[in-house]
Image: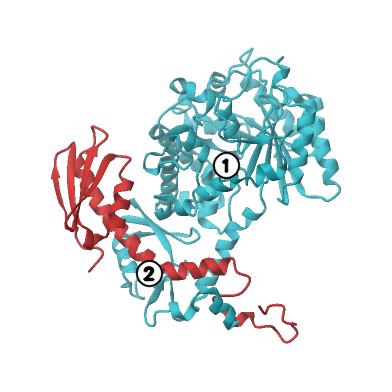
């Protein structure tokens, strides 16, 4: 074993002990506000410290009698000569965080049609006509995409049907679900199905199929009728009424948790955070995802009509989150999803499957999208961008490319290597590096570069703001902190 | 030298543009360059060498910003970057050991824990 250690080139643990003092362990820090800094250890556990304590700590002057000494030691910011167990714990936690990387790709998006009856101004991809068969995925393409799905090493797979409005091509959804379940019977894996639908075409036949095959529904709800219907015009102007009716019917047939909703925040949302949150409560949802509007595809062209600057969204987010917390304190459980994802990474050693907050990028290794025309994209946003003519994130076609050509391509490997935030300028020193991620599609679309320039990145600005806000609430507001911790 | 010492810098200029003069041997080029990069969202930055000093020339991007305030903020950021450089140097070796431990099949921190048990037929020996 000695030979092994020597061959490894690493000094033994006792070389790092500091008799009578402490040995610093790797950590990052960032100014939180005024004299306060947030510091995170190697795996993201955080503490808020005054600057003078931070300086004393780094310069080796922090006395063992200092009130923050025990906190810093227990969270592995340093170790003493009495115990080096921190190194092993950090190594285990680090390994736990990165473990999902070996089980790539879990989320497979099937864009079964681009047809849609809605004409939302921010929608990236839909085609209004319901008659254009040219925008439907063919059965042959779907079968080939199922072949690719089963070559993924991930023990958990999620098949999500996207559009357009996917229920306009329900026969193909039926074909894919039945094919996947038949093949999965041979060597079973945990496979879940979700249809992302506006619920306008939710028939009894669809509900019956979903019940029989354990298919979940995800819909869009932008708030009360006046906001939702203005965001999502359709013939008859009854999008909101159809969502409400569809949610009730789906819950009746499939169960109370079978349908989830996501929010798209447009300019008209910004003045009504309370009304939007209240609508989610009124309709019995226990989750809300305060999402930022993606500047891709058609949405980019509609930005003047529905878009906003990051500061306006930040104000909306703070007010909406405050209302969500107040509702929780009133006894109704409502989880804000983006906060929940960040808090889970900040407060536990576990990773998140959320593609936008992964290092390296989740593109291709967490998610892949099979477009209606058989083209394979590294993410949903990547295929949305393609609708404006930018096919940067296309990596093949289901009819002409093998699994190896798509998922082991040099292009995808380069993208993974280039998007590790551990090595991206500014990210490498940021206290939120263990929690945050990178979004190559966003940076490509907004800055013309897959990595992006962090000092001018709205992605960085928005995430930095939300993370600082959450840390501040955890630190300064015990009532809010209790609610936030319950979401982990 | 204390890493929390006052900056030995000279700020001169006006609201539109300012100059920050810092000692390269005192602060190090990496902290200066990293701090300059962090401010490239708010101002145009140029670095020049004059003897042992680095001259950081700052030009604001937004009319509501004051270049002299930005220069002072950058001086503070250089101090934070110095702290980071010190911390990185101090923990570089232990970071490598933890990373190696995380992905190693043997125990690099406590190799003695990898000794085979009496009933073990040497499967852990390498």
Which chain does the residue under circle 2 lie in? B
Give me the disc on residue A334.
Answer: 1
Give the camera-side residue of A216 and A9: A9
Residue A251, percent from left and from top: 72, 34
Give the camera-side residue of B98 and A265: B98
Secondary structure, mark 2, is: helix
Give me the disc on residue A163.
Answer: none
Q: The chain drawn cyan is chain what?
A: A
Tag 2 residue: B90
Q: How far apart are marks 1 and 2 (CA)?
A: 44 Å
In the displayed structure, A1 sits above or below A87; it is below
A322 on left or right of B46? right
Which chain does the residue under circle 1 lie in? A
In the displayed structure, B56 sits above or below B99; it is above
Residue A47, percent from left and from top: 42, 60
Give the camera-side residue of A396 and B90: A396
Q: The chain drawn red is chain what?
A: B
Give the camera-side residue of A39 and A298: A298
Residue B87, percent from left and from top: 36, 65
Mark 1 or 2, which is nearer the eye?
Answer: 2
In the displayed structure, A193 sits above or below A6; it is above
């Amino acid at each position: 074993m000695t030979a092994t250690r020597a061959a490894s080139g690493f000094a033994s643990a006792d070389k790092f002990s500091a008799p009578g003092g402490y040995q610093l362990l790797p950590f990052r820090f960032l100014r939180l506000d005024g004299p306060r800094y947030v510091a995170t250890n190697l795996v993201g556990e955080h503490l808020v410290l005054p600057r003078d304590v931070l300086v004393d700590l780094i310069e080796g002057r922090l006395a063992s009698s200092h009130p923050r000494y025990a906190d810093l030691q227990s969270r592995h910011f340093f170790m003493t000569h009495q115990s080096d167990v921190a190194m092993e714990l950090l190594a285990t936690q680090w390994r736990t965080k990165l473990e999902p990387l070996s089980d790539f790709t879990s989320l497979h998006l099937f864009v079964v049609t681009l047809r849609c009856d809605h004409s939302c101004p921010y929608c990236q991809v839909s085609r209004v006509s319901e008659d254009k068969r040219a925008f439907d995925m063919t059965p042959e393409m779907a079968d080939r995409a199922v072949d690719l799905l089963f070559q993924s090493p991930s023990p958990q797979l999620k098949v999500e049907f996207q559009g357009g409005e996917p229920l306009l091509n329900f026969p193909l959804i039926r074909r894919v679900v039945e094919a996947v379940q038949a093949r999965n019977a041979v060597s079973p894996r945990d496979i879940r199905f979700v249809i992302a639908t506006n619920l306008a075409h939710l028939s009894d036949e669809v509900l019956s199929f979903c019940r029989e095959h354990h298919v979940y529904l995800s819909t869009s709800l932008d708030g009360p009728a006046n906001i939702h219907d203005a965001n999502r015009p359709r013939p008859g102007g009854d999008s909101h009424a159809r969502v409400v009716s569809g949610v009730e019917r789906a819950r009746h047939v499939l169960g109370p948790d079978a349908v989830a909703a996501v929010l798209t925040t447009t300019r008209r949302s910004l003045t009504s955070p309370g009304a939007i949150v209240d609508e989610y409560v009124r309709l019995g949802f226990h989750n809300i995802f305060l999402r930022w509007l993606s500047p891709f595809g058609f949405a980019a062209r509609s930005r003047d009509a529905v878009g906003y600057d990051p500061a306006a969204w930040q104000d909306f987010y703070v007010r909406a989150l405050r209302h969500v917390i107040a509702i929780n304190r009133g006894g109704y459980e409502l989880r804000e999803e983006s906060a929940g994802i960040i808090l889970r990474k900040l407060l536990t050693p576990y990773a998140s499957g959320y593609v936008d907050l992964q290092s390296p990028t989740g593109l291709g290794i967490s998610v892949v999208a099979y477009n209606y025309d058989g083209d394979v994209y590294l993410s949903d946003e990547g295929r949305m961008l393609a609708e404006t003519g930018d096919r940067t994130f296309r990596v093949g076609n289901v009819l002409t490319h093998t699994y190896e050509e798509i998922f082991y391509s040099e292009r995808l490997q380069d993208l993974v290597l280039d998007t590790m935030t551990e090595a991206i300028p500014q990210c490498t020193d940021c206290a939120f590096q263990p929690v945050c991620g990178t979004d190559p599609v966003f940076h490509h679309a907004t800055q013309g570069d897959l990595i992006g320039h962090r000092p001018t990145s709205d992605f960085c600005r928005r995430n930095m703001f939300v993370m600082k806000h959450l840390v501040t609430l955890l630190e300064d507001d015990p009532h809010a902190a209790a609610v936030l911790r319950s979401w982990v | 030298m204390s890493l929390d010492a006052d900056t030995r810098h000279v700020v001169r200029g006006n609201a539109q543009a300012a100059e920050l003069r810092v000692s390269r041997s005192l602060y190090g080029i990496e902290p200066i360059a990293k701090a300059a990069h962090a401010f490239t969202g708010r101002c145009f930055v140029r670095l020049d060498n004059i003897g042992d000093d680095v001259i950081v020339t700052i030009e604001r991007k937004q009319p509501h910003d004051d270049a002299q305030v930005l220069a002072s903020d950058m001086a503070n950021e250089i101090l934070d970057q110095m702290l980071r450089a010190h911390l990185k140097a101090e923990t570089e070796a232990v970071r490598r050991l933890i990373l190696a431990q995380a992905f190693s099949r043997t125990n690099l921190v406590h190799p003695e824990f990898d000794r085979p048990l009496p009933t073990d037929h040497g499967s852990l020996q390498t």
